[in-house]
Image: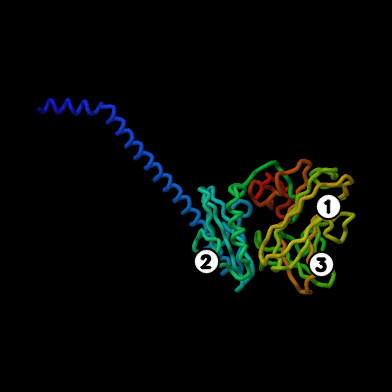
Amino acid sequence: MNVRRFFRSDRAATDPVLVIAAIAVSLILLVGGSFTVTAAIRNGRNLNAQRDLQAVAVAESAELTDNDDYVGYDSVSDPSLEHAAVGFTPTAGDYVTAAVCGSGANAAWIAAARSTSAAVYVASSAHPSPSTDAGIPVGACFSSDDLPALASAAASAAHTAAAVGPTVTNLVACNNFETGTEDDCGVWTYFDATTAMDTTKARFGSRSLRITQASSQVNGINYDGQFWASGDPEFGTYQAGDHIYEGAWVWVPKGLTFGFGLRSPQAQGSYGYGSTFVGIGGWQWVTNTYTVPSSPESYYDPVITMGDGNTTPPVGTNMWVDGVSMVHTHAALPANPAYISGDGNGWTWTGAAEESASTGPERQY
């Protein structure tokens, strides 16, 4: 009997129906197991993004305590918050960003993090716990649309990594106001406004340039392009069809209109080839892109004005500038490059540190 049972078991092991059934069960277990593993990986990635937001909350809290202000952040283009008093390192592959507004007791921040699984989490100074709900409370200086917009930007694939392209040059010397006096190495000119180096607000390093409205006229600053009377130091004279990319980090009171553009011999005393923007009450990155016309001028240089050319803010109104970039290329770039100076990220100063132009690989937001 024992022998017969053995042979019956042996035949059962090779029975096609039973073998197929066994394979089916194995596949079910395998597929189910893979779903479990995939879910675990996804949850782990999402947890990393939430931890990144928690790190931002801690760093921002420390900044408010130390400097009476919050600091904007972008893990691709502006990682300076990572090196603040309470630093952190975001998860590799995550994109994390934070925007700020107000100052002192009225300061606020909002942040968003995209995990490598593409999930987006948000947090704010009013609700520092990570959430998937972009409708969480935010500080009074933000509108109800600001956090959803930040979350939408974080969800964009363009923000998942820094794009590194050809070598370009930021032609603006002393572009982050870390050295020199009010005239910043003699390369900035101020019209009507009063100016001072200021450590109370800084987007990069320890100080920025404060511009104060001093009259009823258009007040502002411009880079002294007459130093480029024979063209810029990288390409020489401007040619028709060349491309100029400019950008600046500015802190402008919320709702205040300001101008940013290019000054040239034909556009003296104005923001000529430019645009107007509206302040958000926190650090914001503004850009302009130009194509040199068929009759190029001898120079073009950045200009920033308070007001829109027709109206001006009250005397005593302040704005701050920290991080100005101007790039000139013959071939068009995919987008306006992010602001980077010779302080790192593969970039070097072309002359004295903090006092010269800087060059390095193009990076984009």
Q: Amino acid at mark 1?
A: Tyr
Q: Amino acid at mark 2?
A: His
**Tag 2 near tag 1, CB within 8 Å:** no
Q: Residues within 10 Å of mark 1 (few under 14, many from 20)?
A: many
Q: Is residue 64 left or right of residue 227?
A: left
Residue 278 coordinates in the image, percent (x, y) = 73, 64
Name the image quarter holding residue 213: bottom right
Residue 52 coordinates in the image, percent (x, y) = 51, 56
**Tag 1 near tag 3, CB within 8 Å:** no
Mark 3 vs mark 2: in front: 2
Residue 335 coordinates in the image, percent (x, y) = 70, 47
Q: If the image is split into quadrants, where does the N terminus sit? A: top left
Q: Amino acid at mark 3?
A: Asn
Q: Earlier in the sequence, mark 2 or mark 1?
A: 2
Q: Residues within 10 Å of mark 3 (few under 14, many from 20)?
A: many
Nearest the eye: 102 or 157: 157
Identify whether 333 is placed above or below 51. above
Name the image quarter holding residue 165: top right
Q: Which mark is residue 127?
A: 2
Q: Residue at x 58, y 48 (%)?
A: 160
Q: Earlier in the sequence, mark 1 or mark 3?
A: 3
Q: Secondary structure at mark 1?
A: loop
Residue placed under numbered mark 3 in the picture? 219
Q: Is residue 329 left or right of residue 9?
A: right
Residue 307 seen from this side:
yes
**As drawn, which residue projects farthest toward the front?**
17
Residue placed under numbered mark 1 in the picture? 300
